[in-house]
Image (tube, helix red, strand yellow):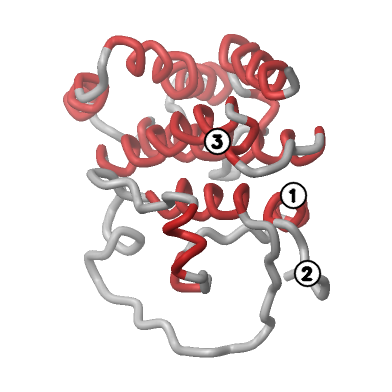
């Protein structure tokens, strides 16, 4: 919805779009030089869905130059039973959560780019990571008890602990705020800043690690 008339670095563009609510992760809306992907060893993570989140942000963090083309270049065919049109379930939770974890690991490396991120770029990255965990929590709260058990059992002990911190406790918070049914009157997310205290502390530590 915004205007991006300049040539930016990837982190600059990421911050501008994230702040404006314009950050889109669909890879079919992006064009890359093949050598950029090869040189930076960027590939889609296998075994999950919603991997576009990880792929796109990884590219933005490592790109030296990026430009926005405000033209309609093709038509999109929306088909039934795709990742975005079929009902969300356990795999969606796992995909968003894994993307959040992978982006946290990338953030600890300073974004994985050739230069350090500015403070405001770091904050935009952390907000995007938060959004991955919130999306996971959005879907997790709609799962049956049996599906929740299967979901958590797919993670190792450390990832399960982080899942409790970033997703499970977010759902508990929703239950408390919504009177026990895990939903909100307006159907939306709790505010980003309502992320559970433990998760908020971890994200604060993450920001501190990125600046060292």
Up/down of 36 relative to 138, above or below? below
Q: Which residue is mark 3?
A: 184
How far apart, in angstroms, are the residues tagged by discs 1 and 2? 14 Å
How far apart, in angstroms, are the residues tagged by discs 1 and 3? 29 Å
Disc 3 is placed on an element classified as loop
Q: Which residue is mark 2?
A: 7
Q: Nearer the viewer, mark 2 or mark 3?
A: 2
Q: Which residue is mark 1?
A: 15
Q: Is 91 in front, or is 74?
A: 74
Disc 2 is placed on an element classified as loop
Characterize the local packing of mark 2: few (<14), some (14-19) or many (20 or more) Cα atoms within 10 angstroms.
few
How far apart, in angstroms, are the residues tagged by discs 2 and 3? 40 Å
Q: Nearer the viewer, mark 1 or mark 2?
A: 2
- Tell me whether circle 2 and circle 3 mark residues in contact (CB < 8 Å): no
Up/down of 136 relative to 1, above or below? above
- Tell me whether circle 1 and circle 2 mark residues in contact (CB < 8 Å): no
Looking at the rendering, in which quadrant would you find the C terminus?
A: top right
- The residue drawn where x is 70% and y is 27% is 193
Q: Nearer the viewer, mark 1 or mark 3?
A: 1
Characterize the local packing of mark 1: few (<14), some (14-19) or many (20 or more) Cα atoms within 10 angstroms.
many
Left or right of 137, for residue 24: right
Disc 1 is placed on an element classified as helix
Asked which quadrant contains residue 119, the reply is: top right
- The residue drawn where x is 66% and y is 43% is 114
The mark total stands at 3
Tell me the tag on residue 115.
Answer: none
The location of residue 105, given as percent across then percent down, is: 50, 28
The location of residue 35, given as percent across then percent down, is: 47, 65
Answer with mark 1 or mark 2, whichever residue precedes in sequence. 2
Looking at the rendering, in which quadrant would you find the N terminus?
A: bottom right
Left or right of 158, for residue 176: right
């Amino acid at each position: 919805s915004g205007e991006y008339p300049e040539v930016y670095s990837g982190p600059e563009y990421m911050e501008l779009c994230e702040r404006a609510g314009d950050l889109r992760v669909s890879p079919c809306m992006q064009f890359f030089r093949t050598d950029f992907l090869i040189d930076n060893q960027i590939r889609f993570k296998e075994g999950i869905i919603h991997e576009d989140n990880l792929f796109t942000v990884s590219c933005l963090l490592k790109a030296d130059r990026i430009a926005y083309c405000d033209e309609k270049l093709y038509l999109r065919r929306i088909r039934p039973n795709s990742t975005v049109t079929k009902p969300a379930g356990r795999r969606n939770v796992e995909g968003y959560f894994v993307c959040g974890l992978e982006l946290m690991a990338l953030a600890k490396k300073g974004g994985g780019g050739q230069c350090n991120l500015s403070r405001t770029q770091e904050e935009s990255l952390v907000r995007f990571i938060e959004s991955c965990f919130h999306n996971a929590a959005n879907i997790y709260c709609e799962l049956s008890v049996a599906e929740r058990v299967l979901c958590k059992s797919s993670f190792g002990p450390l990832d399960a602990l982080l899942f409790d911190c970033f997703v499970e406790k977010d759902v508990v918070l929703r239950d408390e705020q919504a009177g026990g049914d895990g939903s909100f009157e307006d159907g939306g997310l709790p505010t980003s800043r309502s992320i559970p205290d433990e998760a908020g502390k971890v994200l604060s530590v993450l920001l501190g690690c990125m600046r060292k």
